[in-house]
Image (cartoon, grey):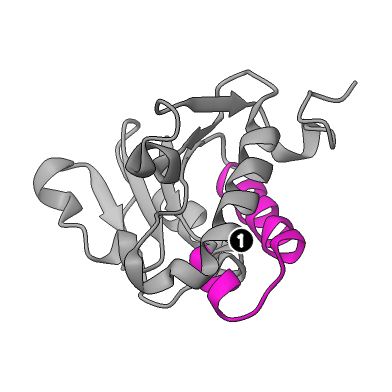
Amino acid sequence: MATMLALSGILFAGDSDIEGWATAAEFPKSVNVGVGGATCANVAKKAEGHISAYAPSTVVLVCGENDLAYGASVAKTMKRLTKAIDRLSSGGARVVYIGTKPEPSTKSLHKKYRNYDEKVRALARGGGGSFTFIDSYSSATQTRSTRTTSCTSPRRATRSGRRGP
């Protein structure tokens, strides 16, 4: 049976990039529910159950690369990500999203990754702090300094990345 996390508890959710982390050693008040091969759609589907079971204050999320690798468009992947973020933040948790990474084995997807990360960045530009984007692709390629961008909710972000009314 799942136990509720302490108020400062962290939920790690997403694909193999999360699954492989030994989070409990570094973050004693955490639960790792990462699953290798998971898509943003998979995360969204399980999100409400995880939030109900663990009630985290913070969610660290990695998803999207598998969606793109399995043939989903950037637009479809963004819809799935937004749904996952909405569900994961429904209990008041702050979502920290770690963007794509430029691995040599996924070189054919790098253009899609950059496009996707730009859209995630635009989503996060609204300010507020309940959704933070960590741009690991740009950091890894050193095309620009690491940036984080925040917004209060994906639903409040407009197409331009600014918060809606």
Residue 17 x %, y %? 32, 62
Is any atom of residue 48 visible in this view? yes
Question: Is the C terminus in the top left, top right, bottom left or bottom right quadrant?
Answer: top right
Task: Answer whether residue 70 is magenta in the image.
Answer: yes
Q: Which residues are magenta?
A: 65-89
Q: At 39% from the left edge and 42% from the top edge, which residue is drawn?
A: 136
Q: In the rendered image, which quarter is residue 120 located in?
A: top right
Against 42, residue 58 (above or below) is above
Amino acid bearing label 1: Lys
Q: At 31% from the left edge and 31% from the top edge, which residue is drawn?
A: 8
Q: In the rendered image, which quarter is residue 32 located in?
A: bottom left
Secondary element at tag 1: helix
Residue 134 x %, y %? 44, 36
135 and 145: which is toward the camera: 145
Against 130, residue 72 (above or below) is below
152 and 135: which is toward the camera: 135
Residue 11 x %, y %? 36, 49
Q: How dense is the environment of label 1, judged by Cα within 10 Å: few (below 14), some, or many (20 and up)?
A: some
Residue occupied by mark 1? 112
Predominant secondary structure in magenta?
A: helix
Residue 118 x %, y %? 63, 42
Q: Residue furthest right?
A: 165
In the picture, measured across the screen, residue 104 lies left or right of residue 88, that is left
Task: Answer whether residue 159 is magenta in the image.
Answer: no
Question: Is the N terminus in the top left, top right, bottom left or bottom right quadrant?
Answer: bottom left
